[in-house]
Image (cartoon, rainbow, N blue to C red):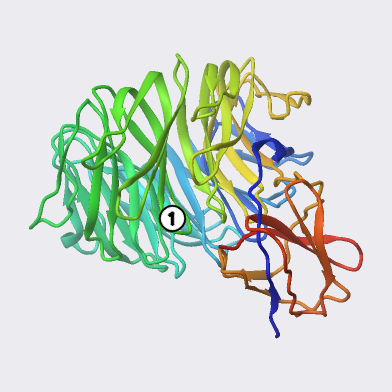
Amino acid sequence: MEKIIFLLLIIVFSITSKSQTLDWIKTVGGICEDVGNSIAINEEGDVFTIGYFCETVDFDPNNNMTNLTSDGFFDIFIQKLDSEGNLIFVKSMGGISDQKGNSIAVDKSNNIYSTGVYTGTSNFDPNDGISYLMGSENIYIQKLDESGNLIWAKGAGGLSHDTGMSITVDNVGNVYSTGFFSITAAFDFNDDTYNLTSSGSRDIFIQKLDSNGNLIWVRGMGGPNSDIGNSIAVDNLGNVYSTGYFSSISDFDPNEENSNFLISNGSWDIFIQKLDSEGNLVWAKGIGGTSDDVGNSIAIDNYGNIYTTGRFSGAVDFDPNDGTYYLEGEGEDIFIQKLDLEGNLIWAKRVGGSNNDIGYSITTDDENNIYITGHFSGAVDFDPNDGTYYLEGEGEDIFIQKLDSEGNLIWAKRVGGTGTGDGLSIKVDEMKNIYITGYFSGTIDFDPDENIFNSISAEGGPNDIFILKLTGELNVGLNYIQQSKVKLYPNPNSGQFNIEISEEVENARFEVVNNLGKKVYKGFLNKTASTINLPGLSSGIYHITIILDTGRKFYTKCILVD
């Protein structure tokens, strides 16, 4: 197949030209506590959520009924929706005690990976089979195929408290997870050389499995008190990044022959750690003040820059090296921090008011913009720089915020009402559609547009699950739909890039539109391939859109040319 070559030079969009609208909102819940902890998406636009539920819950968010009933008090659920929010399947795993799903990931073959915690004897085959794991309060890692059938399930832990908090998968199917363990924990029940013993009440673990669930390596880090790994990410080279919190003095070099001690300033400090693909320490950084400071989520952009969010209080130096860069929290405030791949501070931002505000999840898009969700209350200025952009929370409300790669505000949205809510996990697809899950109680207006109301009340239990989709940024009036199989590379580029289309298209054309919505160039494509030159455009960002002969826009993307 020939290559389509476009020459594009682009303009950066202003804040006022951006717009994000509600595509759909789905809620499920019953009379008990039900929580969506983590969300993932695949290339087809399917949406996967994991969390826990109790009693009987109808997991079909539309007009049909698909009830699940927990075996114990809390059971794990995994739900798959299509891009329109219709139920594809829902699965539950559990036993007579408590089980919770904390994190979910999807690989390129649409296999589903999850981690969390189980207690007692639990069946991890969500269908008619039996696959028991047994433990006191142990870590589980599970792999399902795209239809929700069990491929494998693995347990890890000992006789105390062990929990998987976060999971991710790399391009070749290796599986990485983090969380915490206590006393002695077995990470391979067939080989006691993989046992870890904690230095304190709870230590951090990071483990790597292959696609068949075989243990490649496991590492433990910690000190005499409590140390928790909350979030994990992996780059294209297999380097592993994690964040969470530590206390007192903790050794972050997992090699027994070496040490790399971090000392907390308060009871809890934030850590950010980088391991190589073999589990060796590259670097570890500690950040904190005299109060409690926690890293909740970590993400990596296309250049290997590292983004974290969480919460902090009081005065905190966010430069993890020899410099100083203080942020001052009024109450419990949100931080967003960017480090380079060597762990050097690029910038750090504070968002918060006089109440408690927390960032729970962070992600990036293919243009290295940053998306954060969590909760806030009262009046909060969501512009982390010199401007002001206030949102007013009625109670404990959900926020969704977008920053550019320099930490400048693009927009911020509130989802809230007379009830309470938390955004616990956020993802964004190539079309800039945003997906969020979490929980809510009472009555919440889920449309972030101040002039449109879409209020939903919980079923009557303490919390219900929500799954929210916001559309891509249709700031120039384009009618985006799900993209076809199109490859565009390199991006960024020096003035020339390639687009490959995996299917033949007849009489397709393309348009280039600037940030004011003005069409600045148009042309035709010859079936699957064309060569196009676009002279005279100034540097910046533009939208290129491919349009079929029916008038249907089936692909659009922002391209950056150096």
Amino acid type for the residue under numbered disc 1: Thr
In the displayed structure, does residue 439 sit left or right of residue 448?
Answer: left
Would you say residue 53 is visible in this rendering?
A: no
Relative to 224, say whether 364 is above or below: below
Q: Position of residue 288 (x, y in %)?
A: 27, 31
Relative to 348, say whether 398 is above or below: above
Relative to 229, say whether 152 is above or below: below
Q: As drawn, which residue projects farthest toward the bottom?
A: 1
Quadrant housing residue 444 = top right
Q: Mark 1 Cα within 10 Å, few/some/many (few <14, many 20+)?
A: many
Q: For mark 1, what is the residue?
A: 168
In the displayed structure, does residue 423 sit left or right of residue 124?
Answer: right
Q: Position of residue 525 (x, y in %)?
A: 81, 75
The front one of 509 and 539 is 539
Which element carries disc 1, helix, strand or loop? strand
The front one of 355 and 387 is 387
Q: Position of residue 90 (x, y in %)?
A: 62, 48
Quadrant housing residue 487 = bottom right
Would you say residue 376 is visible in this rendering?
A: yes
Relative to 101, say whether 350 is above or below: above
Give the residue displayed 25% in from the left and 58% down from the top: 218
Image quarter of the C terminus: bottom right
The front one of 134 and 356 is 356
Q: Position of residue 519 (x, y in %)?
A: 82, 56
